[in-house]
Amino acid sequence: MDLQTPMTEALTLTGIDKAFAGFPALRAASFGVRRREVHALLGENGAGKTTLMNVAAGLYRPDRGELRVFGEPVVLDGPRAARKRLIGMVHQHFKLVPTFTATENIMLALEVQNFAAGRLEIRRRVGQLAEDLGFPVPLDRPVGTLSIAEQQRVEILKALAAGSEILILDEPTAVLTDEEGARLLANIRRLAERGTAVVLVTHKLRDVIAHADRVTVMRGGATVTTADPRALSLDLLTALVVGEVVATPTARQTTPGAELLVARGLSVSAADGPPLLDDVGFTLRAGEILGIAGVGGNGQTELVDVVSGVRRADRGSLRLAGEDLAAAPVATRRARGFAVVPADRKTQAMAGDLSVSDNYAVGGVLRTAFGGAALDHGAMRRAAGEAVAAFDVQGVHRLGQKASLLSGGNAQKLVLAREFSADPKVVVVHSPSRGLDMRAMAAVHARLREARDRGAAVLLVSEDLDEILALSDRVAVMSRGRITAEFPAPVDRQAVGRAMVDHG
Amino acid sequence: MSDFLINWLAMVPVFAAPFALAALGLLVTERSGVLCLAAEGYMLIGAIAAVGASLTFGGYPLLPLAAGAVAAAVVSLLFALLVLVFRVEQVIAGLALVFFCLGLSSLIGSTFGWTSRTVSGNPQWPIPGLSEIPVLGRLLFSQDLIVYLLVPLTALVAYLLNGTMTGLRLKAVGDSPDAADAAGVSILGTRLAAILAGAALMGLAGAYLSVVVAKIWVDGMTGGRGWIAIALVIFSGWRPWRALGAALLFGSIEALVPRVAASGFAIPQYFLFMLPYLATLGVMVWTAWRGGGGGAPRALGRPFLREDRH
């Protein structure tokens, strides 16, 4: 596309400032998108991409700055006003009623007046739209029973059915598999060709390079630059996003020690149906990272639950230096030096309504690190403050603030700080960098390597093959609840990839 | 034996009606995501208000019933203030309201001298012709106005929930307030309307108990029927027709009590009085065993707070 041609932009944001409780989230951010283009908004987590788009969608009112829709200055005092201006946004967390069908969800959002007639009309229109776009969606099943990719399509159809000509997609590929993501991006391209102005909010460089006509990079709440992504190299784009060069990890130096954690014959079966875990065994040495690779849903979650003690195995043993812990409760395992970083940070690893300080200190409370019957809150705060500094947890304005206000990467750093505070012998981590940007991911990975180098045995379960390969000393592949292959270092990526999809 | 059966079944609708009205009211409120433990309280307020209206303005059948419904709705504004504006824990607010209404109703009763005075009851409205049919006429067509209204009322609630945009918004608010909010539905407005409408139905249930069934007001006369209605709603999975069915089931158990007592079976009377509560326990155990609480609005009992950083 010729960038020099003057065109009216469908949506223009100019000099937007927005602060939350005195902390600036946006600083003079400017952004524009035209019809028939896919414009990527690229940046790390916490760079302000979602905040800026929430301003465009009428969810946040800017402190300063101007919004124009098709050249006309507007003030959006809510999502409804944005919808009237033909702006639709698909949020990262879908706004769907899970018990409703797709049709009912769209009827609700479109403020249909007559139920019976509206249902027929919406069903017909949405069905037609879905067909035109190659967007197959079951219209009459509860949305909660649909796959994430299908739910996302419902959200997009909802926005389009409302007549949106400016479509904002917030991290749409983050929740999808690679294949679904590619399909979605192809569909987005088709939408743009039909005349829609599409904003693609993302932190994935590859999506930008492959699928965007223009890219605007955000960093620290400001828009850094707008450019044609094909004119930029991956390295240059990375540097723009991060603001500095992220060091690539160095190869490890140490050699593993004695056998520490030995699992044999771990099995878990569902009430009916195939076993979830089927005779899983592994040996983990001190100072070693064992990566468990596999396509999601092949027993990884169950393995993490069984090893961490959240779920009891039906059969099998789990020996830590000879002591069988297969039936031991979580507290016993923790006392023996287990640290666990579950995949679901928000619900399993943190209590979002509690303070940053409490979320950190709860790890030490059972060890009576902060006093016995009466807790020493001062000591808890001091320890939390030190950990926040040591682990570089950003966005902590007060130690008493709710932990749920932290961004994903910073929340994960806080969890790691807590889990590593007692110098664990065994570390169980599940998808530690899911949804994190590059810088946060690098920090998390560095912490895991540090733990390994201190002599901890690390069980790394991840569906992200890059992550597995970057960290693991050995790799095992899970498929249908079994460990089907094992690879010593150096690990051949192709071989692991084949083992992941081979269900033989 | 057939006399026993007919006498028993003919009484079932009268005993079932308060359960059905209260359960429908609860269902309307709870489908909006507001946990309503105050049923017993609304029924007491409805009962005393109806007796008061009847003693003050005469026995005209509709006025006392309407007074009961309106009075309960007015009291429910207090509940709405607590749970919607102040976001008080809904269990606590509901319990507090029950005890408040228990006290308020007996205070009103003794202050105005309405306690233990019989009111002229709501006459039965036999339907000409149909009521002459043997057996069936007695069971179905020699009842009072409220009983006749039960089926249309249940149909109305079911239609409202499943066939109108109002119902769609109500269910959205109860299942997924975030999604409803994003769709531009007023969460607090919808919940307020649901609390008022539900309380009116529960008040009507109490009014029916005092002016139609008992024809008298005594303190605490609802005797735990509000609590049973709460169990019925859980049992019914928050669905109107099932709630009506469950109400008929419990009505038939309650109707059994005076019949058995009158027939001279040697069963301790307190055991008979216990039957409905025993049945409630049984139903709850069965519901739990079956994988309980299915159909509950997903946001039931959770106050709504917009999750953004304004």
Image: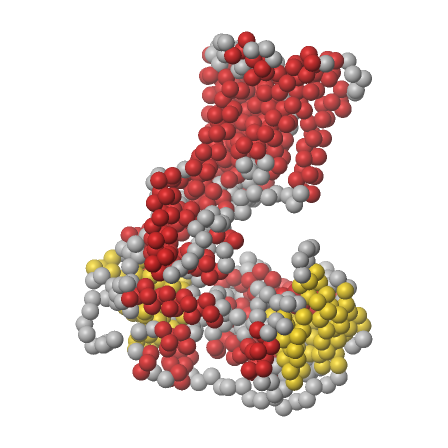
Q: Residue at x 58, y 82 (%)?
A: A495
In depth, the one of A203 and B55 nearer the eye is A203
Q: Position of residue A352 (x, y in %)?
A: 55, 60
Whether residue A425 sits left or right of residue A55 in the image: it is: right
In depth, the one of B301 and A153 nearer the eye is A153
- A138 versus B33 height, above or below: below
Q: Position of residue A50 (x, y in %)?
A: 40, 65
Quarter-wise, where is residue A339 in the image?
bottom right
Quarter-wise, where is residue A249 in the image?
bottom right
Q: Can residue B105 be seen?
A: no
Q: Quadrant of the C terminus of chain B?
A: bottom left
Q: Residue at x 57, y 73 (%)?
A: A501
Q: Position of residue A139 (x, y in %)?
A: 43, 51
The residue positioned farthest toward the left in the image shown: A6
Q: Position of residue A427 (x, y in %)?
A: 66, 74
- B127 versus B67 height, above or below: above
In depth, the one of A250 and B112 nearer the eye is A250
Quarter-wise, where is residue B111 in the image?
top right
Whether residue B151 sits left or right of residue A199 in the image: it is: right
Q: Residue at x 55, y 38 (%)?
A: B238
